[in-house]
Amino acid sequence: MQQHRRDFTDYNLLKEKLDFYIGKHSDIEIISGTARGADRLGERYAEEKGLTLTRFSADWKKYGKRAGYLRNEEMAQYATHAVIFWDGKSKGTAHMIELCKTYGINYRVIKF
């Protein structure tokens, strides 16, 4: 899984870090929360590399402001590893980091 910040636009940094952490593993699946920023860049990365891509969309109409947190919970229950791009401010991304700790997910945070 890779995780988000909506204003993250540095595809080269994302590609460099995912190439490093993924290495030569062939059984990789990219998980996206479908938000602008790192999520969408991760989708692009998966498509370019021919990797399995699974999208978890937040249902904003049904759940309102809680939708992003509920989506994060779904992703955390699904994931085994995570690469998270964080500006140090995003509450949604901080929530994802806490979920990784709670679920024992092996994760790395890339600050930008």
Image: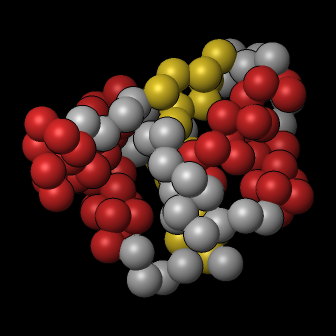
Left or right, 16 with reference to 68: right
Q: Position of residue 53 (x, y in %)?
A: 60, 22
Q: Quadrant of residue 61?
A: top left
- Placement of 7 over or under 41, stated as above or below: below
Q: Is residue 67 visible?
A: yes
Q: In the image, what residue occupies the spot 52% across and 64% down? A: 5
Residue 80 visible to an observer of this rendering:
no
Q: Quadrant of residue 11?
A: bottom right
Does residue 27 lie above or below 49 as drawn? Answer: above
Q: Is residue 44 above or below residue 101?
A: above
The spot of residue 21 in percent (x, y) is: 74, 46
Residue 43, placed above or below residue 63 = above
Q: Residue at x 14, y 50 (%)?
A: 64
Rendering coords of residue 76 (x, y %): 32, 39
Q: Quick one: 68 or 73, which is closer to the camera? A: 68
Apparent side of residue 78 relative to residue 109 in the rendered image (left or right): left
Where does the image place residue 35, in percent across and percent down from the top left?
Answer: 49, 48
